[in-house]
Amino acid sequence: MSLELEGLERAYSGFDLGPIDLTVDREVLSVLGPSGCGKTTLLWLIAGVLQPDAGRITLDGRSIEGLPPERRNVGLVFQDGALFPNMTVEANIAYASSDPAYAAELAELLEIEDVLDRRPQTLSGGERQRVALARTLATEPDALLLDEPLSSLDAPIRRRLRSELHDLFDTIGIPVVLVTHDQRTATALGDRITVLRGGNVEQTGPSTAVLERPATRFVADFTGNENIFEASVAARDPETVTLRVGDVRFEVAADADSGPAVGSTLTACVHPSRVRLRKPAASLDPGEALVEARVRRWLNEGDEYRVVVELEHAPLTLTATVSPPEFESLAVDAGSRLRVVVAPDAVHLITAERPDGRAGTERPRQD
Amino acid sequence: MAAHSTRAGAVRRLDWLTVTLLLGGVLLVYYLAPMASLFLAVPPGEVLGKMTNATVLGAASTSLLSASITTVLATLFGLPLAYWLARTDAVVKNLVLAAVILPLVLPPTVGGVVLLTVVGPNTVVGSLASTAGIPLTRSLAGVVLAQTFVASPFVVVTAKAAFEAVDPTLEYASRSLGKGRWATARNVTLPLAGPGILAGVTLAFARAMGEFGATMMLAYYPRTMPVQIWVSFVSLGLEDAYPVAIILIVVSIAALAILNTVASNPWE
């Protein structure tokens, strides 16, 4: 079972989407991008609510781009749920399903049994999303599309629904495309991520790869990677590239084919989760670069801490995410001294840059 | 000092509202007094007696029948036009809307005149219809044509607003759930726009019941209630017009009751 988009294009109220080429198998593809990047348009094209100007949409080998929405068997969960206000929750689900037993099963699965006789207007945001999802799943779709399924929810409900959705997607075994502007939702739910910018695909890849190896500065910025810096190439051999920032050197695992020349300047990044902090007296593993640093500030983000450190021998500030126990054992405080450890495979060189690339103007929202 | 001036301000505002009510009240009395006076002027027994009169009954049944047909026609053709107006981005939208509103602002007698140039006895359409046995003037068909011209814009304009209030996303949702356009219209759009549509239908029926100007030009016979009022007034005097006028007032009040209960009153 797979959903394929080939050269999909649509000019839409002053901006152009595409051409988009994507293949989604039995997996969850998170489409991540700022508002106005064409995420919703993309879903509406696949669902048939909008017609593409060009391109092909194939679902399980059958071409569906010319079909009306009701004949595509593509389930679309709209951003605010789009529940019918003139029907009860139960009637909303029954409207989509010809099988009452399956509708009841979905109600149980999504834990909405006790709101079945209520009107959509009286539901909370989380309940509305569950009902909308149940209603869409009741049609037994061949592909599932979700438009910002968690954006209107409070953080605790969002977190809970996120993990529930994760389990659900595992069990339904159809292509799922989820669009969101929230990096955490994208990575938590997506097997792969596509970053969309100004109507075009900036990068597609497994979640971890997109986070740790962003293709462009925009992707790095939008996925919450704060550690982007310019560095010069100090040395190079077949396995490693040595970068220099100030008096600090980083070893980077080299790409065999496209190596930068010694002396050139390039953009590198390290995902905050790959920056490790150690106590001042800590010992090193082989190959690790170790740098003296001082804590500038830290931020409690609930389930983790974000610690910003200034390197002592380079004009460089790095952010590290630290788990609460680690945070405590490091005794982090503003001004305290620490060592920063960056593994060679943690540093990524951003080589592709779109000619019009102006990164950093659009910021993701985070919970 | 400050407290005193605030207090004085409050009093002044109150006074101003009272003044506006008093001035507006003149108009209110002007609306209601004639109605009350009509009901008081005629002994109920006499009105009831005249209501069983064959002429009055004939006029009432003509009006009810024609206004019902008109309402059905106006709804049947008005709803699709209203939906198109509510959803289209076409550049001609405003022109179409202007064409719909034109009969509303046109003096009804002028409406009758323009209709006669199309369906009058000496026109192509009129003579063809006469030959086919369906005369379009001096007939029930003529009454319906006149009423539809004047009353149907109420359905279109009011239902357009009702359709516009239905979020198109709900229609998209219905279709992505596997329902076609008809099922979507029947289960989602029409129920949600229902109160507004009912308001338009009610207004159209009330307007059709009261239609006089265009009807006089197209179909003096068979007499509708407004025409009968005029005939009674001219030939027999004002008092003979009372019973039919009272029936029409009752119809109007019933329409108002519908607007303020099950329908959504477009003027609220």
Image (cartoon, rainbow, N blue to C red):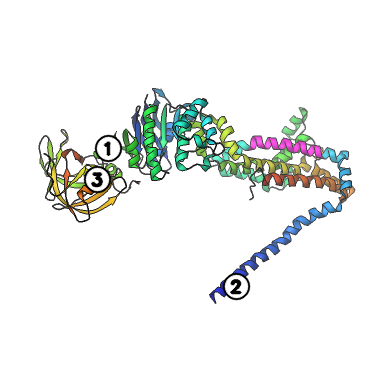
Q: Residue drawn 39% across and 26% down?
A: A58
Mark 2 or 1: in front is: 2
Q: For mark 2, does the 10 Å Cα neighbourhood hold few (<14), some (14 to 19), or many (20 or more) residues?
A: few
Amino acid under disc 1: Val
- Region in magenta: B60-78
Residue A325 disc label? 3
Badge 1 element: helix
Q: Is residue B153 left or right of residue A347?
A: right
Magenta span dominant secondary structure: helix
User: Does the rendering let one see residue A226?
Assistant: yes
Q: Residue A334: x and y, percent?
A: 22, 55
Give the labeled residue for mark 1: A210
Chain for numbered disc 3? A
User: Does the rendering let one see residue B211?
Assistant: no
Q: Residue B66: x and y, percent?
A: 76, 37
Residue B73 disc label? none
Q: Are marks 3 and 1 in contact (CB under 8 Å)?
A: no
Badge 2 element: helix
Amino acid under disc 3: Pro
Q: Residue drawn 51% across and 30% down?
A: A96
Q: Residue drawn 27% across and 39% down?
A: A211
As displayed, is residue A309 above or below residue A259?
Answer: below
Of the numbered discs 3 and 1, the one sitting upstream in the chain is 1
Give the camera-side residue of A223 and A33: A223
Q: Is residue A348 left or right of residue B239?
A: left
Badge 3 element: helix
